Every structure is written in C-alpha cells, then in structure tokens.
Image (cartoon, rainbow, N blue to C red):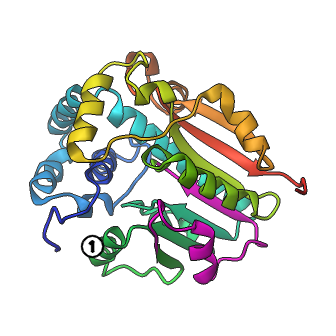
Amino acid sequence: MPTYPPRNVSETAANMALIRALETAKPNRQRLFSDPFARRFLPAWQRALVTPAKIPPWRRMLESFFDRQAPGARTSGAARTRLIDDWTRAAVRNGAAQVVIMGAGFDCRALRLDELRLSSVFELERREMLNLKSRFLADTSASHVRRVPIDFLNEQPEDCLVASGYSPTVKSLFILEGVTNYLDRSAVDSVFNLFSHSAPGSRMIFTYVHIDAINGTFPAPGLTALLERLRNLGEAWTFGFRPEDMPDYLAQRDLRIVADLSATDYRAIYWRQPMLLKGYEFYRAVLAEKTNAAR
C-alpha cells in the first residue's frame, strides 16, 4: 500500500472517498450505492475507523462526527454519487460509447458500474493523482480505462483526449464531479468548448458551486468554516455559476439542460426524511445534452 498521504494529492478527493466508504458499509437494503474500492484511498487511521462501520452504532457515531465537522457534505455527497451513477447508466443505455471522466480523482465508476465495462473510459487528472490511483488499484483489471494526465489550467483537454484515442464523432458521456469550482473561467470555458464539439446526443454531467458560496454569502450552515478549511488545505474554490445563468451559458455552446438540481433536490430523491438534512445547498449537479444545432 502506498505511503499516505502523499504530496500533491487532493485532500478533498480523499474526503469524498471516506463518504463513499461509509455509505458502502451500510446493509444492501439501506445504502445508496456500493463502492468497494473507496476504502483503499483512505489513510490507515481512517481505514481503521471505517473497518467496523458495518456495526450500526459505530457507523452512526462516525456519521454524526462527520456531519458536525462539515454540515451536509456527507448526505449531499452520497446522494450526488447515486444521482450521477443513475445518470451515467442511463446515458450508456442511450448509446454513449465513450465515457470521459474529467478530474477523475478517486472516482471508481469505471470499475464498479458494469455498464461502463462495455465503453471506452478516459480518466483525466493530474499525473500525481493518476499514478497514486494506479498503485492503489494495481490488482484490478481495467483494460477499458485510459488514464490521461492533464493540467487543466495550462493544457487543452481536447488535445489530451484526442492524443489518447478519443473520437469527437462518437456519442459520448462526460462527467465532471467536483471540478469546475477548482478552475478559472478560461479552463472552464475550455472544458465546455470540448463538450460543444462532441457528437449530437452526447451527454454531460457536471457539478458546480453557486457563485455566492465562493464569496461566503450563500445562506448555508457551516459555509464559513468550510471555506476557511479549504483555504488552509490549499484547495480553495475559485469559480462558480449562478443557476439562472446556466441555460444561456450552455445554449451558446449548443448544449441544453436536462436537469439542474441543488443538494436539496437530489437529497429529496434518495434520502428518507430529506427535510431533516441541511447543508451544502449551494452545490448543484447538472445533466446536459449536446443538441443537433450546427455552429
């Protein structure tokens, strides 16, 4: 097992792995999804805590502690994972033959979703993260996955993808979970311009943060502490959208919104008693589709 935590590895990506590991520890009938790989990415002390999480009182204690530290992060993160899983399965059933996961981090959909084993999957991420991920998953079979190193702030994703075998004429699915809020406007535009060059009917799943959360004015519990923690980690959020601006932004690139949901919306889909769950209302998930319009 690689030494942990290595340098230049996203701590927020590791936190998302913890959320997925905790959800996976639940009984089949209760959990929103299963990610058996998530615990591999945890530091040793977290793996030790999560190992007995199949015991309900212990798991509830861990969840309660997590929720106090980051209100809404766990419940919205788990619901968002399930939402993107469902949207991904639907896109592949609808004919997406290529799947591009940008800012892949510790995302293991290519391994845990059977539907993706029939597609070509491209995972774009910083080289350090890709190398670490490959080491953690060295015993897995992933011949359908191509891991593509990229610096989103200084390289064009389209150039990197085409050089790795991606075809813009093939109906595709693009997934950007937890990516846009760490980029600048130029990098975000480059990513969406890539989408605009995809085959008609291609679908795009992405998350974004309400721009008011970037400056700390969005009314959500724990936001001030969250922003300070992100700054201390060197992973401050740098970019956001306003939901009312999203339709026009996408339409300019021949994309249309299928759904644009807040954390409140997707928690309501998957959690029992969702009205009791608060926090992270500023975090949104979008499903968009490439239209047939010619530019």
| Amino acid at pointer 1 | Phe
Snapshot quadrant of residue 252: top right
Q: In this view, does 233 lie above or below 271?
A: below
Residue highlighted by disc 1: 136
Badge 1 element: helix
Q: Tag 1: Cα neighbours inside 10 Å, few (<14), some, or many (≥20)? A: some
The answer to which of 57 and 142 lies nearer the viewer is 142
The answer to which of 62 and 219 lies nearer the viewer is 219
Q: Which residue is drawn at 30% across and 48% down?
A: 12
Residue 4, position as x, y percentages in the image: 14, 64
Q: Is residue 146 left or right of residue 174?
A: left
Q: Residue at x 29, y 51 (%)?
A: 21
Residue 78, position as x, y percentages in the image: 40, 41
Residue 95, position as x, y percentages in the image: 75, 64
Q: In this view, does 227 lie to the left or right of 258?
A: left
Q: Residue at x 61, y 74 (%)?
A: 159
The answer to which of 43 and 274 lies nearer the viewer is 43
The answer to which of 157 and 1 lies nearer the viewer is 157
Q: Where, quadrant-wise, is the N terminus in this rendering?
A: bottom left
Q: In this view, does 118 lie above or below 197?
A: below
Q: Is residue 93 left or right of residue 37?
A: right
Q: Is residue 222 left or right of residue 192?
A: left
Q: Is residue 134 magenta?
A: no
Determine if residue 65 is in view. yes
Snapshot quadrant of residue 278: top left
Determine if residue 281 is in view. no
Q: Is residue 165 magenta?
A: yes
Q: Where, quadrant-wise, is the C terminus in this rendering?
A: bottom right
Q: Give the range drawn in magenta.
A: 149-177
Residue 64, position as x, y percentages in the image: 21, 29
Q: In this view, does 278 lie above or below 133?
A: above
